[in-house]
Amino acid sequence: MEKPIMTPLKVSKNFKTFSVTGKRGMEMPEHFSTKEAVVTVQEGSALLKIGGEEKLLEKNGTYIIPEKESHSLSLLADFKAVAIMATDSEIEFIQPNQKTQS
């Protein structure tokens, strides 16, 4: 499975930012952030699966992902977003029988 690309942008004392880009059909497998994250969609759309629900992420929308809330992302169109999280936050991917840190 091809995943969207997360590119570090800026890091400060309290926050770090990433560009999240990908093509239609890409998927970000189930994962969580150890701290709350904010995602602002700049282009395209995606389906966020979180807390047993599906939410449509659309251009110009801002979404808050709670800390340690497992979620996945399926890109419905070419996609570009900015993710903002605490500098000491980590993203952990959930795989069968193991967790890996990214």
Image (tube, helix red, strand yellow):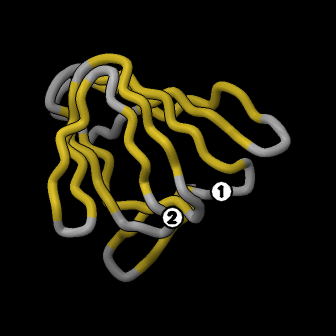
Which quadrant holds the N terminus?
top left
Which SS class for mark 1?
loop
- Assess whether mark 2 and mark 1 are in contact (beta carbons under 8 angstroms): yes
Amino acid type of disc 2?
Answer: Glu
Residue depicted at x 63% and y 31%:
8
Query: In terms of depth relative to the viewer, which is nearer, 1 or 58?
Result: 58
User: x%, y% of residue 3?
Assistant: 33, 40
Residue depicted at x 18% and y 26%:
24
Q: Tell us which disc is closer to us: 1 or 2.
A: 2
**Image position of 50 with respect to 85: above or below:** below
For residue 98, which numbered disc appears in the image? Answer: none
According to the picture, the residue beneath numbered tag 2 turns out to be 67
| Structural distance between the alpha carbons of marks 1 and 2 | 9 Å
Which quadrant of the figure has residue 32?
bottom left
Q: Which class describes the residues within 10 Å of circle 1: few (<14), some (14-19), or many (20+)?
A: some
Residue depicted at x 25% and y 43%:
27
Amino acid type of disc 1?
Answer: Ser
Is residue 82 found left or right of 76 in the rendered image? right
